[in-house]
Image: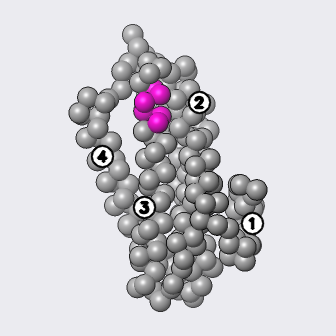
Amino acid sequence: MILNHLWGLYTHPKEEWHSIDRKHESYFYSLSHIAIVSLIPSIVSYYAAAHLGWSIGVGDIIKLTKGSAMLMSIGMYFGLMTGVVALAILIHELAKAFDASPTYTQSLELAAYTATPLFMVGFACFYPVLWFVMLVGLVGLTYSVYLLYSGTPILMHIPEEKGFIYASSVVTCGLVLLAILMAAAVILISSGLGPVYTH
């Protein structure tokens, strides 16, 4: 069943990583996990932008037209999917430097399950107040990083000390990847695909 490791990763992460390692799913299964979990921030942010409106602080509530919010949400969905697959490729390529030889499926599993808490932050957009979403986002990011550090030595079959350095390298590359995705978003917005606000 898709998402069947989700609860375990929140309640007993290390045991769940061992379970994932024992029962490797198919590459398609991991892609399906990402495809479903990526829907959460995309759909909820569409609803928040088009129907609830964002509160940035002082000033009026900011709303987008439905068409604009839909376009931004579709872009977000494919951006999230691309980001996780790119992170999986980075995990796979970095493995050689740490005497690990994971399959692409193992690399994708690590990337997909690590990113899940961050994607769950999307639910916070039901209360679209900037400081609140940023606070929940920080908690999600922290737990995602924890999952990466705890899961890397288990899935990659390397000692914990080496796993720590490996995971740190993945975090660094992930931040670079995030910067690239943000830059791509800025370029798209500045080329005329930016948000359209309601009055």
Kind of residue indicated by mark 3: Ala
SS assignment at label 2? loop
Q: Which residue bears the numbered disc 1?
A: 12
Q: Would you say the residues marked 4 and 3 are in contact, meaning their CB atoms lie under 8 Å apart?
A: no
Say if 105 sits above or below 31 in the image. Answer: below
Q: Main secondary structure of the magenta part?
A: helix
Q: Nearer the viewer, residue 146 or 187?
A: 187
Q: Which residue bears the numbered disc 4?
A: 184
Which badge, 1 or 2, is on the more N-terminal residue? 1
Which badge, 1 or 4, is on the more N-terminal residue? 1
Q: Residue at x 44, y 55 (%)?
A: 83
Q: Which residue bears the numbered disc 2?
A: 127
Q: Would you say the residues marked 1 and 4 are in contact, meaning their CB atoms lie under 8 Å apart?
A: no
The magenta segment:
69-74
Kind of residue indicated by mark 1: His
Q: Would you say the residues marked 3 and 2 are in contact, meaning their CB atoms lie under 8 Å apart?
A: no
Say if 157 sits above or below 174 in the image. Answer: below
Q: Which residue bears the numbered disc 3?
A: 86
Q: Nearer the viewer, residue 37 or 126?
A: 37
Q: Give the image location of residue 54, x and y in percent.
A: 48, 25
Kind of residue indicated by mark 2: Tyr
